[in-house]
Image (cartoon, rainbow, N blue to C red):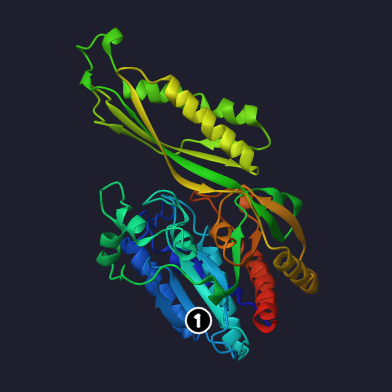
Amino acid sequence: MKVSQERIEKHIKRLSKYTATPNEGTTRLTYSEEDLQARTYIKEQMKAYGLEVREDGLGNIFGKLEGEKKDAPGVIVGSHFDSVPNGGDYDGPAGVVTGLEVAALFQENQIKPVYPLEVIAMIEEEGSRFGGGLMGSRGIAGYLQKKDIEQLKDKNGISVPEAMKKIGLDPSLNVKRNPETIKAFLEMHIEQGPLLEEEQISVGVVESIVGLTQLEVTISGKAGHAGTTPMDRRSDALVAAANIIAKFPQIAIEEGEGTVTTVGRHEVFPNGANVIPDKVKFSVDIRSSKEEHIKNVVQKVKDVIASYETDNIQAEVEQSLYMEPKELNQEIRSLLQASCEQLDISYITMHSGAGHDAMVLSDITDVGLIFVPSKDGLSHCPEEWTAIHELAAGVEVLYETVLKLTEES
């Protein structure tokens, strides 16, 4: 077995070209022109490696190498291929490329698996276009019904089915996957933190994934002229929102044990320099390794928001996503560790502070997740980088593990 660093690098570089912001990081929103370019390339590579390709009713891409066992459940390898605005080239694509390289190695070594091998490239993990995040895996797991999907719209009011049709996808296809058709799911991801690099360790075998929730908050006031409305007669939605948001960091600090809150997106209406804002929408991302902390912080955030409500300032809070903390499958973790030892690749076990598709799919199948080092711990920015030889080490570990899973009963 010889993992091809050249092939891995080729895929990473090619996918990085499909961005709406050349020279300013990767911006590849779901169902965009860049999405279409990337999915066309991914499907071409899947076919070149002998996989049978299909897309589901959300546009998740599957490439399947049939196994000797008829109608047996598949071992799925992959990740997502969307990005945050002005993100990096590795978050998501590294995992998709891992799946492609595993398929290429099966083809080169003329391996006919007992259980099918599947490579997957999932959509909208980041939630950058339709909010919430993890949309592709939530659809596969059955957490998004057709009616839910039809109601999801981007900031321009374009629905998921409308956006899909624009790039030639079929939203009428099935989305939910029967769990009995999946034997296991394996994902490789860049760490997005500094630990592996600092410790000079090649692989992190993930034991558990942080729980997270996302709230969508709307603060409503009353518009007015910036020059003629006295300060004591204003119902300024932005001032109320700013005061509310300023209290969130302290809530997380007091909760402790690594609990974090982030307001990463906000919109101001009508957004005029000389108009008092009458509405502000913002997101609140809350994460912790313990479910009790998430629930506590959600309640405290809601309490703070409610405390600013008056006759002239109203607030609405909607929970767009909730994922409880997850412990990943012990048997898969043991297989991953055994593969590291067999290959003499250094590893540690670790916790993931970021959410991943693996956390959703762990509800319906056995899941394994590994990390490879991130330079300076940077991610979600153009400076995001992982050396090709480090990606290759991770691919080796997953390849060996996939070999065992596609052969074992």
Q: Position of residue 293 (x, y in %)?
A: 62, 37
Q: In this rendering, is residue 393 above or below 297?
A: below
Could you say which is closer to the camera, residue 239 or residue 68?
68
Could you say which is closer to the camera, residue 3 or residue 176?
176
Q: Position of residue 116 (x, y in %)?
A: 57, 83
Count of all numbered marks drawn on residues in the image: 1
- Residue 117, by quadrant, is bottom right
In screen coordinates, is 108 left or right of 262? right
Q: Position of residue 168 (x, y in %)?
A: 28, 71
Residue type for callout 1:
Lys
- Residue at image location 66% in from the left, 38% down from the top: 258
Dot 1 crowding, Cα within 10 Å, few <14, some 14–19, many 20+: many
Q: Position of residue 146 (x, y in %)?
A: 35, 61
- Residue 226, by quadrant, is top left
**Image quadrant occupied by the N terminus:** bottom right
Residue carrying label 1: 64
- In the rendered image, is residue 199 in sight? yes
Per the image, label 1 sits on a secondary structure element best described as strand
- Residue at image location 72% in from the left, 49% down from the top: 198
**Image quadrant occupied by the C terminus:** bottom right
- In the rendered image, is residue 7 in sight? no
